[in-house]
């Protein structure tokens, strides 16, 4: 390891207390999503910190705010290096899922308590520690007196937990994070300290509605039951489609390995009257199922769509008088960065140099903001790397281990030096 690199790693150690304090301050702002609480306050804290560390900072709001009572505020900082390129962009989301059942926590979910070598609270791992780590990784380089050859941008964004449409998607759509001036993007999600995440599977949510004919429940022959029709369709999905999907495996290194297959899940199923009211005898004239299909980078989206359509077509002759319609509720295409892409390699090397063990390349079973960076922004060298353990995300007593936070910061600092060079 070069002298400059050693000096930067020492600077990370010297920043340990500041790094912890900043992480705690982020956790103490309950940026709960839904509904999207106190985003402006959190963006302001990140922005003020970046300004203190010599970044040019601006707030980015979505072109149309989905919920004016809870303004969506993203923040972006730019630290110019000797040259505008290469440009490395770190992104982290500061929205957090609700704390859930308070009785399940032994710590204050928004206390940011430091105990047992850990910082505790909702959003520590997922993923305020990631935001803190990338900011202090670059700050360690600055405090060591090292000037970067290329430029760093850092963004802290909203709504990742609900799809990221007012967050990273807006940054990309507004031209702030696109291939036109960005070379590498690192999303600081918690996927474990020694893992470099290359992408995620695709998602297609389809709502299927069956419309029948209502009749008195004592004379069902006079009607056409949408409940029976949707039940037959769900049975077909289970009997005809699911076994075929289970045979389709992916070369993507998805963790856990059970998720290395195409899957379908019936996310919601409803027919006829509401169940929480008194019932009157009726043949159900409308029924809806929502299917969550996870698809592989090896599958074609058109085929994925056609498969469900073909099942409905096969059901038609058995369900006379039923009208079928479908609506796509969400589509996320799969993304997979090459494992020899520059950011992937730089992070894997830095993991080995800091931790003394090889990094694993993985893919995520669920999606995160990489989809927007790749699909809207067109930046293909995009990975996820951050402190925090995947298994603690969204659970009671969420935490991040301080030593792991510091190590991740070192790994980010080394990778930044190597991707951008020095003057
Ligand atoms: Zn997250």
Image (cartoon, rainbow, N blue to C red):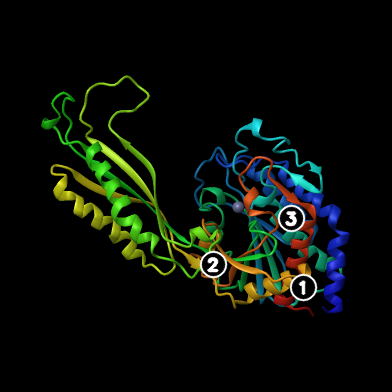
- Disc 1 is placed on an element classified as helix
Earlier-in-chain disc, 3 versus 2: 3
Residue in front for this viewpoint, 407 or 171? 407
Q: Is mark 2 within 8 Å of ligand 1?
A: no
| Residue at point 66%, 76% (across, down) | 86
Q: Which residue is mark 1?
A: 353
* Residue 173 showing in the rendered view: no
Number of marks in the rendered image: 3
* Residue 355 showing in the rendered view: yes
Give percent across and percent down for residue 311: 25, 54
Q: Is mark 1 within 8 Å of ligand 1?
A: no
In the displayed structure image, the side of residue 132 where residue 305 appears, left or right: left
Q: Which residue is mark 2?
A: 253
In the displayed structure image, the side of residue 125 where residue 311 appears, left or right: left
Distance in Å between CA atoms under marks 3 and 2: 28 Å
Distance in Å between CA atoms under marks 3 and 1: 21 Å
Q: Quadrant of the C terminus?
A: bottom right
In the depicted structure, whether residue 294 falls above or below residue 299: above
Q: Quadrant of residue 199?
A: bottom right
Give percent across and percent down for residue 409: 76, 62
Distance in Å between CA atoms under marks 2 and 1: 23 Å
Give percent across and percent down for residue 182: 60, 71
Which mark is nearer the camera, 2 or 1?
2
- Disc 2 is placed on an element classified as loop
| Residue at point 51%, 41% (across, down) | 67
Res. 132 mark: 3
Q: Quadrant of residue 101?
A: top right
Which mark is nearer the camera, 3 or 1?
1
Res. 310 mark: none
Which mark is nearer the camera, 3 or 2?
2
Give percent across and percent down for residue 388: 69, 54
Q: Quadrant of the N terminus?
A: bottom right
């Amino acid at each position: 390891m070069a002298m400059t690199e050693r000096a930067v790693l020492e600077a990370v150690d010297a920043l340990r207390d500041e790094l912890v304090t900043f992480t705690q301050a982020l956790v103490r702002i309950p940026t709960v999503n839904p509904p999207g609480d106190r985003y402006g306050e959190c963006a302001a804290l990140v922005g003020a910190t970046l300004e203190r560390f010599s970044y040019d900072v601006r707030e980015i709001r979505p072109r149309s705010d989905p919920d004016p009572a809870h303004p969506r505020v993203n923040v972006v900082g730019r630290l110019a290096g000797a040259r505008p390129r290469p440009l490395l962009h770190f992104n982290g989301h500061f929205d957090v899922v609700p704390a859930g059942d308070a009785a399940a926590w032994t710590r204050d979910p928004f206390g940011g308590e430091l105990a047992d070598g850990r910082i505790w609270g909702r959003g520590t791992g997922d993923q305020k520690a990631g935001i803190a780590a990338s900011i202090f990784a670059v700050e360690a380089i600055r405090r060591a007196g090292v000037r970067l050859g290329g430029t760093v941008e850092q963004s802290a964004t909203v709504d990742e937990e609900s799809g990221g449409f007012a967050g990273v998607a807006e940054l990309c759509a507004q031209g702030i994070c696109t291939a036109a001036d960005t070379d590498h993007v690192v999303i600081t999600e918690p996927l474990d300290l020694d893992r470099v995440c290359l992408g995620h599977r695709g998602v297609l949510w389809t709502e299927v509605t069956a419309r029948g004919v209502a009749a008195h429940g004592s004379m069902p022959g006079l009607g056409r039951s949408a409940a029976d029709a949707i039940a037959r369709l769900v049975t077909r999905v289970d009997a005809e489609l699911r076994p075929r999907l289970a045979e389709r495996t992916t070369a993507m290194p998805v963790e856990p390995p059970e998720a290395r297959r195409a899957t379908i899940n019936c996310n919601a199923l409803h027919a006829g009257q509401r169940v929480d009211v008194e019932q009157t005898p009726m043949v159900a004239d409308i029924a809806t199922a929502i299917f969550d299909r996870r698809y592989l980078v090896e599958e074609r989206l058109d085929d994925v769509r056609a498969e469900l359509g073909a099942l409905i077509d096969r059901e038609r002759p058995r369900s006379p008088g039923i009208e079928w319609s479908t609506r796509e509720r969400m589509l996320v295409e799969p993304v997979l960065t090459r494992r020899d892409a520059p950011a992937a390699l730089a992070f894997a090397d830095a993991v080995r140099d800091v931790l003394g063990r090889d990094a694993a390349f993985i893919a995520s079973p669920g999606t995160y903001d990489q989809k927007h960076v790749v699909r809207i922004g067109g930046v293909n060298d995009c990975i996820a790397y951050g402190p925090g353990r995947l298994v603690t995300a969204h659970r009671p007593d969420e935490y991040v281990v301080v030593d792991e936070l510091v190590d991740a910061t070192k790994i980010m600092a080394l990778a930044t030096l190597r991707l951008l060079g020095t003057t």
